[in-house]
Image (spheres, helix red, strand yellow):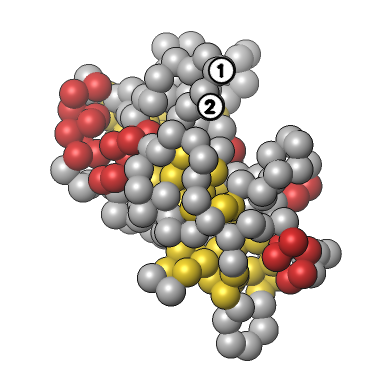
Amino acid sequence: MSDAKTRLIRRAARDIQPGMVVNLGIGLPTQVINHLPQDMAVCLHSENGITGIGPTLSYERADRNLIDAGGAYVSPLPGTAYFDSATSFALVRGGRLDLTMLGAFEVSMRGDLANWKIPGRFTPGAGGGMELAQKARKVAILTTHCDRKGKPKILRECSLPLTAGACVDRIFTDMAVIDVTPEGLVLREVLEGLSVEDVIKATEAPLILPDGDIIRF
C-alpha cells in the first residue's frame, strides 16, 4: 500500500470518536481498524452480524470462523456480540450507526455516491452499501482521488449507477479531505507534499476554498 493511502486511512481514523458505533465498508475502510488506539471505547459493526470487532488478524493467528463483511479475519473483544443478518440490518435501518466509512467509484458535488456497479463488469451485488449510505448518521468516503486511468472520481455528476443520492458528508482521498456542504464541496485538508492547485486539477467538481490556512495531513 502506498504511503499516501496509508496517510489517508490514518487521517480517516481520527474522525472516529470514543463511544461511536461505526461500520467499516469493504476496501480501504477495513484498514481503519488497525489505526485506532487499542484502548479506544468504540463499537465496530459489520453487516454480516458482528459488533465489537477487534483488529484484523493474519490467517495463521485467526479464528477462521470470524470474518467481517469483506471476508477479513477479525478478532473478538470483551463484549463482542454475534447475531443474524436481519438483526444486523435492523441496527442499520434503525439509525443506530453514528458513522459508516465506505469506498467509492464516484462521488458527485452534491454528495451522490456510486460504489456498487460498473456496467459491463461482474458485481456480486450492492451488499449493504445502499442501506448504510442512506441510514447511517454520517457517511464518510475513503477512496483514491483518481481512478487507475487518472480520471477524477469527484465529479459534478456521477456517471455510474447510484448507491444513494446526497448521502456523503466527508470524502477522504490520497490527496485531500473534502466536506460536502449545502454550498458545495469545501477543501479542508491537503496531503503533505501536494499543493491546493494539484487537488483542484485532479477534481472535476468545483472546490470551495475555506477562509484561513488549509490543514496538511
Q: Secondary structure at mark 1?
A: loop
In percent of width and height, residue 171 lies at 53, 55
The image quadrant where one finds the N terminus is top right
- Which residue shows up at 42% across the image and 12% down it? 65
Q: In the drawing, what numbered circle is on residue 118?
A: 2
The foreground one among 70 and 115 is 115
Q: Is residue 108 above or below residue 71?
A: below
Image quadrant assignment for residue 208:
bottom right
In percent of width and height, residue 169 lies at 42, 59
Q: Is residue 124 left or right of residue 92?
A: right
The reply to whether the C-beta atoms of the residues labelled 2 and 1 are less than 8 Å apart is: yes
Density class for disc 2 (Cα within 10 Å; few <14, some 14-19, many ≥20) is: few
Q: Is residue 34 above or below residue 12?
A: above
Q: Is residue 9 left or right of residue 90?
A: right
Would residue 169 be visible to someone looking at this image? yes
- Which residue shows up at 50% across the image and 31% down it? 26
Q: What whole-number distance in Å separates the C-alpha atoms at marks 2 and 1?
A: 6 Å
In percent of width and height, residue 2 lies at 78, 42
